Amino acid sequence: MPVEIAPSILTADFANLERELDRVANADWVHLDVMDGHFVPNLTIGLPVVRRIAQISPLPADVHLMIEDPDRFAPDYAAAGAKSVTFHLEAARGPVRLARELRALGAKAAVAINPATPVAALADLIDEVDMILIMSVEPGFGGQSFIERSLSKLRQAKELIGSRPVKLEIDGGADRTTVPRIAAAGADVIVAGSAVFGAVDPAAEIRALRELAR
Ligand code: DX5
Ligand code: ZN
């Protein structure tokens, strides 16, 4: 399976989201960063915006919830049409229950871990999820530099996944210089915000990143 590219709209023009989606039409997912100003020190979009994007986007929505109390709010994003809903392990009170609820709503359930959370913390959740997201920056902002230690976390996560049908996603600091190492470490889905939307031609950048990941 070729590596999938998920452009994060965090660095896109928020006043022209429909046009921005057009510019990344050759991507595999659109990555939507929901931040609540509590779990992370930034505030972005919420349910009404995600719902509309899910309705109009030709790309499946990969919703990344950087919020407190995902147990309460995450199911609404599945119901709003997100194809995949990622909650943070650090924020969830009942991660197994929440993953099951998301799947029951027809979404893929994904769990994210921050840079300082060990991969081992996912061991008892691995059979309940469709995807693991390794944060390779502290969540909250686009344009930060890649934390190199994330590469060994990717390899550990790959080993934990084994033959299970669980995808491995990485988020933060992916660009032309880091993507070859990220792909070699086993990532299946690469989120790229500033690298894609900061490029003159985002579609060409997606092609370049895919090529570098081969
Ligand atoms: C960070 C977000 C990322 C971010 C990635 O908290 O979860 O999705 O937009 O941006 P870049 O690719 O610029 O690091
Ligand atoms: Zn994200």
Image (tube, rainbow, N blue to C red):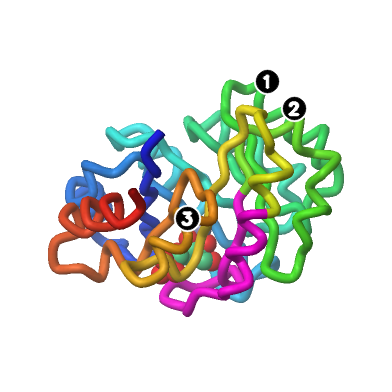
Residue with the mark numbered 2? 100
**Amino acid marked by disc 1:** Ala
Classify mark 2: helix, strand or loop.
helix
**Residue 160 screen position, x and y as percent:** 73, 43
* Figure quadrant of residue 128: top right
Number of residues whose C-alpha sits closer than 10 Å to that of mark 3, classed few (under 14), some (14–19) or many (20 or more): few
* Left or right: where 101 falls relative to 140: right
Of residue 212 and residue 103, the one placed in the foreground of this image is 212
Image coords of residue 168 (percent x, y): 57, 45
What range is drawn magenta here? 133-155
- The numbered disc on residue 104 is 1
Question: What x and y, as percent, mark residue 68?
Answer: 73, 58
At 79% across and 47% down in the image, what residue appears?
122
Q: Does the magenta stretch mainly form a helix, a strand or a loop?
A: loop
Q: Is residue 168 magenta?
A: no
SS of the residue under disc 3:
helix
Cα–Cα gap, marks 1 and 2 = 6 Å
Local packing at callout 2 (Cα closer than 10 Å; few below 14, some 14-19, many 20+) is some
State the residue position of label 3: 184
